[in-house]
Image (spheres, rainbow, N blue to C red):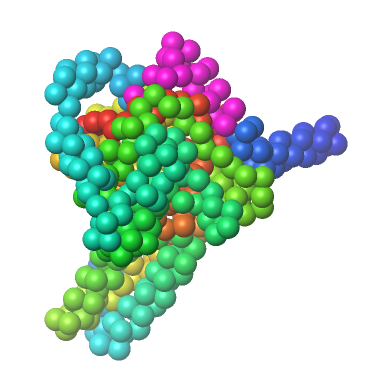
Amino acid sequence: MKSLLNTLTVVVMLAVVSIANATPEQDKESFQRFYTERFPDITMEDFGNGVYALDQDARNQWEAMNDFPPYEDDLEKGGELFNTAFANGKNYASCFENGGGNIRQNYPMFDTKRNTVITLELAINECRVANGEKLLPYKKGELAKIAAYMTSTSEGSPINIVIPNNGKALAAYQAGKQYYYSKRGQLNFSCSNCHIQNVGRKARSETLSPALGHTSHFPVYRMKWESFGTLQRRFDSCNKQVRAEPLEGQSEDYRNLEYFLTYMSNGLPVNGPASRK
Amino acid sequence: MINIKHVVLIFCLLTLTASVFAAKATKSDAEESIQSAQQLWDKSIAVGHEWNTVKPLVAQAKQAMETNDFAAAVALANRAAEQAELSLVQAEHEKTNWVNNLPK
């Protein structure tokens, strides 16, 4: 009996170690399978609508609101900002592949020369600095509007995050994965505790949204913010809710988290910008 | 045989003793407590598990010290230190236990 228990313990430990060290592709498959098995009536594409894929009442209100999307003015402003020339005569389009159009689905990407994760918002600001302009605040304001405009040009394109088979890229991915699953804050919650283990259940009056598709529609216009906010602004809100101190915008931890989480939604179409409560 | 009167008496004596000691907190006690809390807080930032409840407690402790309320400063700094310490325990625990939150 004792040897049987020992064997079982070893098998369980090996299983845990193998899950922790699964390849990104294996992670993505088990992540997406979790949601498709849990919510068999929801199409893969609809997971990009977050809580509105799960809660019909909320969806009806949201769809009614979207007859006149609250973000239209800010999105238009984002387009104007994107197309406005810098003082040196160049513009954002000069910094990006395809003139900056239809590229959101490729971000965040791993820069193998610099060995770091580059988010779209970071790339926008780096473009500004390269052209002699000042940095913009990372989580809201003009940068979020520009990113929202760029996202709109990718609507319908499948998310296509690439994790190069090199140690640094895998380490960044793994760090993001560990951040996502680690409990933090005084309330001792991980991101996954809400969006995986308790997805679809209520936290006070709010239905907890699925993590699959979380990144497909950012920047998001939240009624609570009355403006666009980037994904990392949303990370801040989650951290505050569990009483953890949010991180600086574009900190390495946040960029790695964004890298991991967006990779989990690979294949889903970009459907942003979007509005949320 | 201990009866309820004895228990109440002992509780009152302990509370009184504690309040006397608290009232006697000095500026250096407050400084020491705040420094200790600050060190633990810094450690929690370094390991990436800072709680957002610690910063306001340290700020309040410093404010209490400025108004010469050293007992309050010590109490607030101790609460900050306790929470920072718990965040370090959490960080240590999550080094290995994060895998328990993977989708199953």
Q: Which residues are magenta?
A: A28-50
Q: Which of these two is toward me, B17 or B9?
A: B17
Q: From the viewer's perspective, is residue A35 above or below residue A255?
A: above
Percent coordinates x, y for residue A13 in the rendering: 72, 40
Q: Is residue A69 visible?
A: yes
Name the residue: 85% across, 36% down. A3
Please provide percent x and percent y for residue A273. 29, 33
Quadrant for the C terminus of chain A, please.
Answer: top left
Q: Is residue A221 left or right of residue B67?
A: right
Residue B53 in view in this figure: no
Asked whether, in this view, residue A205 is left or right of residue A44, the answer is left
Of the 4 image quadrants, the one containing the N terminus of chain A is top right
Q: Is residue A116 magenta?
A: no
Q: Position of residue A161 (x, y in %)?
A: 52, 38
Name the residue: 24% across, 71% down. Answer: B59
> Is residue A32 inside the magenta stretch?
yes
Q: Residue at x 37, y 62 (%)?
A: A130
Number of numbered discs = 0
- Residue A86 found in image quarter: bottom left
Q: Position of residue A203 (x, y in %)?
A: 31, 32
